[in-house]
Amino acid sequence: MTKVARYIGQGVFYLLFIAFIGFFSTRPSFTNMQPDEALIKFTFAHPGERLVPCEEIKAEDLAKLQPQRRFKMKCSRERAPLQVEFMMDDRMVYQAEIPAKGLKHDLPSPVYQRFTLPAGRHQLVVRMRDNIHDEGFTYVAEKEVVLAPLQVMVIDFDENNKQFTFQ
């Protein structure tokens, strides 16, 4: 077989492969929601408060330590689990206690939940407690939203402003 025939054969097979991929990238059409539904994604990662508060090391004890180990504060790494509640139209749809991640339980606790609901007006309430020493919830947000059909809304926690955001 000549080189030209091989190159033409490769070109034909590449075009068939591209056509195959192109067809199945658009067909069959798929939607994960009905035309009259909306989606809420409740997702964030937040570190709980430290379980044991930091304690200050005395100056005489600090002088006994090696220079690279001289820290003014001694802190435990373990974080409190998050208590999270999500209410929609005066009914509880999600309630969980999410432990801190990591080997020493010192990383943020991740939350990711999806809720499909009918489009229209809804009353949303989000609550989170990140401290086991306090009663009640540390952060609470309430919002009335109007969701259009096929709309996706994300509920996140803004670490800088320390509040929930609805986008």
Image: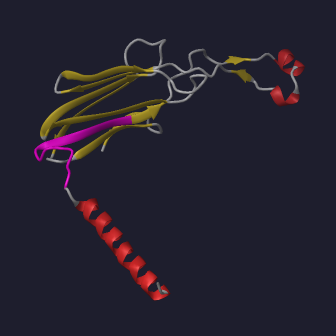
Residue 107: x %, y % from top left? 55, 29
Residue at 37 percent across and 73 percent down: it is 13
In the foreground, 2 or 136: 2
The magenta span reads 29-43
Color theme of the render: secondary structure
Q: Write down the quadrant of residue 118 in the picture.
A: top left
Q: Write down the quadrant of residue 21 in the picture.
A: bottom left
Which part of the image, by quadrant, shows the C terminus?
top left
Compared with 81, 158 (above or below) is: below
The answer to whether 74 appears left or right of 164 in the picture is right
Residue at 19 percent across and 55 percent down: it is 29
Residue 42: x %, y % from top left? 32, 35
In the foreground, 141 or 29: 29
Compared with 132, 161 (above or below) is: below
Residue at 20 percent across and 49 percent down: it is 31
Residue at 25 percent across and 65 percent down: it is 23
Is residue 39 within the magenta segment? yes
The answer to whether 88 appears left or right of 69 in the picture is left
Is residue 80 within the magenta segment? no
In the foreground, 97 or 48: 97
Q: Write down the quadrant of residue 56 in the picture.
A: top right
Compared with 77, 41 (above or below) is: below
The answer to whether 36 appears left or right of 133 in the picture is left
Residue 151: x %, y % from top left? 20, 47
